[in-house]
Image (spheres, rainbow, N blue to C red):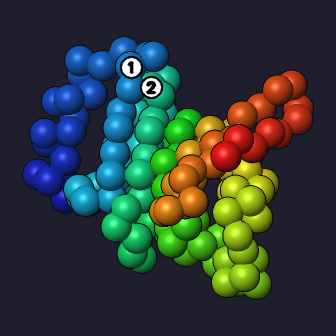
Amino acid sequence: PPRSTLFPYTTLFRSVESGDYLVLQNEISEIPYLMDCAYEKGMHIVLNPSPVNEKIFQMPLEKAEYLILNEIEAAAILKETDAALAENADGTALLNGLVHKFPDSKIVLTLGKEGRSEERRVGKECRSRW
């Protein structure tokens, strides 16, 4: 990206420390750059990839420590690698697909009127809670 568009962000990253949180939603520019800088600084990255659009495929999603998303966003992200799962999945299948694709991330999947599902790891075992 042009250096002039990054100026506010480079200034921001001078004052952050490892362990700080960066919370992002897919409504601002330069998210890949922000995620890369935050990751290098050792920050916790929380991402809601909403609204879903082609920009999510340019983001280093594996660097997000927390992904907070709904079924539509989950299906869009999974469709890239598993179209059948994305089109036919219920909440549990989507959650499992996200956990498989992003094993180092903590996933919160909202399910509309069905509530939410979150993935928790206990040792190497994954557990879902509805």
The residue that mark 2 highlights is 43
Q: Position of residue 36 (x, y in %)?
A: 44, 42
Split into 4 quadrants, where in the image is the N terminus? bottom left
Q: CA distance from mark 2 to mark 1?
A: 5 Å
Q: Position of residue 87 (x, y in %)?
A: 67, 84
Which one is nearer the viewer's eye here, 116 or 121? 116
Mark 2 surroundings: few (<14), some (14-19) or many (≥20) residues within 10 A? some
Q: Which image quadrant for residue 78?
A: bottom right
> Viewed as shown, does residue 114 lie left or right of 5?
right
> Viewed as shown, does residue 45 lie left or right of 121?
left
Q: Could you tell me which secondary element the residue under label 2 belongs to? A: loop
Q: Could you tell me which secondary element the residue under label 1 belongs to? A: loop
Q: Residue at x 47, y 28 (%)?
A: 44
Q: Residue at x 80, y 39 (%)?
A: 127
Tell me the tag on residue 20: 1
What amino acid does circle 2 point to?
Answer: Met
Which one is nearer the viewer's eye here, 63 or 77? 77
Contact between labelled residues 1 and 2, with CB atoms less than 8 Å apart: yes
What amino acid does circle 1 point to?
Answer: Asp
Q: Residue at x 86, y 25 (%)?
A: 123
Question: Taking the image as drawn, is residue 129 in sight?
Answer: yes
Q: Residue at x 53, y 39 (%)?
A: 66
Residue 71 lies, with reference to residue 60, above or below; the image says below
Q: Position of residue 73 (x, y in %)?
A: 50, 67
> Viewed as shown, does residue 29 lie left or right of 26?
left
Q: Earlier in the sequence, mark 2 or mark 1?
A: 1
Tell me the tag on residue 93: none
Q: Position of residue 34 (x, y in %)?
A: 34, 44
Mark 1 surroundings: few (<14), some (14-19) or many (≥20) residues within 10 A? few
Check the image and name the residue furthest to the right.
Answer: 124
Which one is nearer the viewer's eye here, 112 or 30? 112
